[in-house]
Amino acid sequence: MEKGVPMCLVTVLLFALTCSLASASDPSPLQDFCVAINSSTSAVFVNGKFCKDPKIVTADDFFFSGLQIPGNTANRLGSNVTRVNVDLLPGLNTLGISFARVDIAPYGVNPPHLHPLGTEITMVAEGTLYVGFVTSDPDNRLFTKVLNKGDVFVFPIGHIHFQFNVGKTNAVAFAGFSSHNPGLITIADAVFGSNPPINPDVLTKAFQVDKNVINYLEQQFK
Ligand code: GLV
Ligand code: MN
């Protein structure tokens, strides 16, 4: 046997060990925050859900019916998302996966938003969607694509993304998420519709626009 082979193996193993140590970290949070308390009174399980005793689990805990029903798009955005997450399908708890139906009327939009806890993979079932996401600072690169029936696109976890119906018919897409509850931050709602509102001086300076513009936007997203 060649002398160099075992040495080479040792080097590879050491390298692998170093890499795994270097990338060790706390797991991703499953909620916005988790304030520590000393007693279990008023405590909730880490992801907000306890586990049902397996002895009383039934098939219905793993079942949801209704995604054949179009969401109502008669709203200011012309879009509707039905999210089959752990709240609607308790059997998803801790499994790291969930699902959604997205309906978008012609010229409607699922506005710029992000999922802090999960990657999204979308497949267009009907219609045509212009979709995209933006990378983080400092590049802020925009990746876009026009998707037709059967096309699939991925929105990486935590990235701002959108879907816009550029077709003449209603669009329907189905999305999978790498979390039982990927979370949702809709940019405009969070920035201009927070409760209580962010001081307009902050937003005027941040967006470099006239204060009237900020007042107007805060009225829209109240
Ligand atoms: C659909 O894109 C959704 O994020 O809910
Ligand atoms: Mn999304």
Image (cartoon, helix red, strand yellow):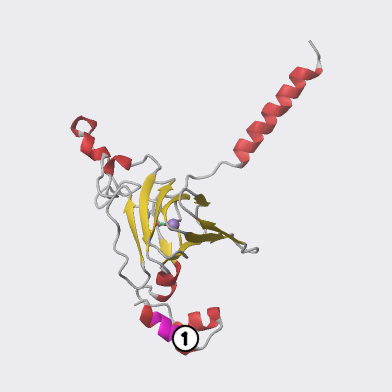
Q: What residue is at 32 percent from the left and 65 percent from the top? A: 73
Quarter residue 141 falls in? bottom right
Q: Is residue 39 left or right of residue 143?
A: left
Ligand 2: image quarter: bottom left
What span is colored magenta in the figure? 214-218
Q: Is residue 222 visible?
A: yes
The x, y position of residue 128, in whole percent, is 46, 59
Q: Secondary structure at mark 1?
A: helix
Image coordinates for residue 7, horizontal then vertical, percent = 76, 21
Mark 1: C-beta under 8 Å from nearest atom of ligand 2: no
Quadrant of the image containing the N terminus:
top right
Q: Amino acid at mark 1?
A: Val
Q: In the rendered view, would you say 206 is above or below 103?
A: below
Query: Which residue appears farthest toward the right when viewing the image?
Result: 3
| Residue density around tag 1, few if under 14, some if 14–19, many if 20 or more, within 10 Å | some
Relative side of 12 to 122, left or right: right
Of residues 80 and 169, the one nearer the viewer is 169
Q: Is residue 38 left or right of residue 18?
A: left
* Image coords of residue 197 (percent x, y): 38, 77
Front residue of 53/69: it is: 69
Q: Residue extending furthest left?
A: 56
In this rendering, the answer to whether 55 lies above or below 164 is above
Q: Is residue 217 magenta?
A: yes
What residue appears at the point 28 percent right and 45 percent down from the top-left corner? 89
Q: Residue at x 36, y 82 (%)?
A: 219
Q: Position of residue 177 (x, y in %)?
A: 42, 48
Residue at point 45%, 89% (across, down):
212
Q: Would you identify the image quadrant in which residue 12 lies?
A: top right
Judge whether residue 180 can be spotted in this image.
no
Which residue does the numbered mark 1 point to in the structure image? 213
Judging depth in this view, the residue of 157 and 123 nearest the camera is 123
